[in-house]
Amino acid sequence: MPTYNAPVKSVQFLLNDVFNIARYANLPGFAEASPDIVAAILEEAAKFSQEVLAPLNRVGDTEGCIRHDDGRVTTPTGFREAYRQFREGGWIGISAPAEYGGQGLPATIGAVANEFFISANMAFAMYSGLVQGAVAALLAHGSDAQKRHWLPKMISGEWAGTMNLTEPHCGTDLGLLRTKAVPQTDGSYRITGTKIFISGGEQDLTENIVHLVLARIEGAPAGTKGISLFVVPKIRVNPDGSLGERNGLSCGSIEHKMGIHGNATCVMNYDGATGWLVGEANRGLNAMFTMMNEARLAVGLQGLALSEIAYQNAAAYARERLQGRALSAPRTGDRPADPIIVHPDVRRILMTIRAFNEAARALVLWAAISGDVSHRADDPRARQEAEDRMGLLTPVIKGVLTDIGFANAVQAQQVFGGHGYIAEHGMEQFVRDARIAMIYEGANGVQALDLVGRKLGKDGGRAVMAFFAEVEGFIKEHAGEEAFKPYLGPLAASLGHLRDATLWFMQNAVAKPDHAGAGSTDYMHLFGLVALGYMWARIVEAATKKLKEGGADTDAMKTRLTTARFFVERMLPETAVHLARIRAGADTMMELPAEAF
């Protein structure tokens, strides 16, 4: 059976030493997030993940969810009790406003806890993750009455939440959706249509489910301009807050899928269900994007979380599995073979995953802190800069972290050899669970197009130019310091590759948009490598300072410096390959007729 140990010390180092979270103490919620409070939260999240969620991960995978003839869905054994504990622990509302029953802490702290939960049991964590996204959408776009009506019990965990976008004929291109909304005299709407791939669309964990549904009001314009957002509860709620009649919606079936078996992925049928408009009519996609952006960052976190638990188990196995002899080191005692950790190729795998994990965690926290600043700071300029950074990093975090997270799960499985392919060690489940993160909430090719087609040119390129300036400023600041030489040269070279790729698009993609499409995934990964390299530079800065101060964590800091060197020597040079592919353009890619495929 797999094991999991939440990386509490790694998170504390990043929060306290790399990002100096104390500097934000003047912002709402941050003052309450003192180091001792954060430490207590992390320890509790780690304990719950390790002792409650992790043991249920295999159970959820093998049992799956069951849909009954009456449309009810039961979750795997142990999920209901675990969710009760989860709810009572206040984890769903950790960063929600106190006025609706939340704890009001920074979303950054919630992101940290969510990493632990996802690593331990991704399918379980998805139920609460979607509630948090639905809460964010209602906070941003719901009326005051809707907030008072829906949010308290969603934040408490008594009610769940979902988002309903996809239809059988309509995935990424939401302008094609057919679900319709008919106005009623009382101000409500009758919602009719079918939605698919709805995570947590039906379950037995909560007494009600608040669905956020995209639909088209009768007579609305075609395409995305005619889409509205509605709140449609599973059970209608009386004015006094009590539950009333069952609404006109049901789970038609549960998808049989590759992984995340413990999460109910439902086909949802709406047959004249009562719903209420959220925000303005025909502006639903704008409202839903609030939830989608939350979800995309959470999915990026899934890539990191699965990479982390896969790494932990692969490293433990490599230290114990005896196979072959070391190429150069002395034999290990009198044993008939050496542990495979001595073999360079096994080390290559483990170091590659480790070097990704810590930098990816830093990147997620940097984005999460930016999100908090964008919502909580009084200074308009600080809010704008943070919002720009958040928007720029969202497709990178979603696309790059899930692509690499899945690849790392496969690599970790490889460490086990044939034992990784069978279910006993759990590695094949990590691979299957990680695969979906590259697909949902906008497939990664769409994330790359979003980055290149929208984010680069947004506001005259303000966000990407600010990113270039920040990384370049860091390099110049430390250019004369001997300790930084192994790291800054490669980072500067890769930043140059990113600048060159950006300029190439400016010069070539306007006249021929296919050039942008052909190079978008390579650009996204080039950007991701530079962002991860910058995170490693920030980590090196903090680790070097800690080493000068001395203390009990000297070995951990030296390990970080070695891992950073591995990243800049073995992983960061891949930016040159991505640049070469981008410059190759789209001609060869687009030359063959469709019939040739």
Image: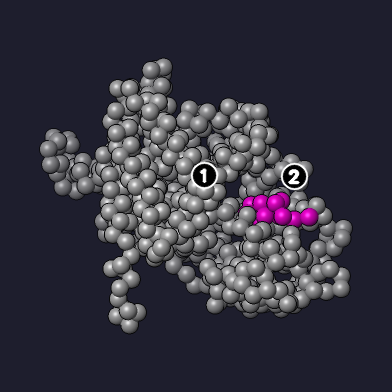
User: What's the residue at 33%, 37% (across, down)?
Assistant: 491
Query: Is the residue 29 above or below the residue 303 in the image?
Result: above
Q: State the quadrant of the C terminus.
A: bottom left
- Residue 84 shows in this picture: no
Q: Quadrant of residue 481?
A: top left
Please report the residue visible at 27 percent of the width from the left and 54 percent of the height from the top.
Answer: 580
Residue placed under numbered mark 1 in the picture: 462
Indicate yes or no whether the magenta region holds residue 72: no
Front residue of this view, candidates 47 and 349: 349
What count of labels does the image hold?
A: 2
Marker disc for residue 7 = none
Which amino acid, by three-letter code, is at mark 1? Arg
On screen, residue 355 versus residue 340, left or right, reads right
Instruction: Tell me the kind of residue under disc 2.
Output: Gly
Marks 1/2 in contact by CB < 8 Å: the verdict is no
According to the picture, the residue beneath numbered tag 2 turns out to be: 101
Mark closer to the chain start, 1 or 2: 2
Percent across and percent down for residue 468 are 43, 40
* Relative image position of residue 123 (x, y in whole percent): 52, 58
Q: Position of residue 132 (x, y in %)?
A: 64, 52
Nearest the eye: 96 or 292: 292
Q: Residues within 10 Å of mark 1 (few under 14, many from 20)?
A: some
Q: Which residues are magenta?
A: 132-143
Q: Residue at x 40, y 34 (%)?
A: 472
Q: Is residue 87 left or right of residue 426?
A: right
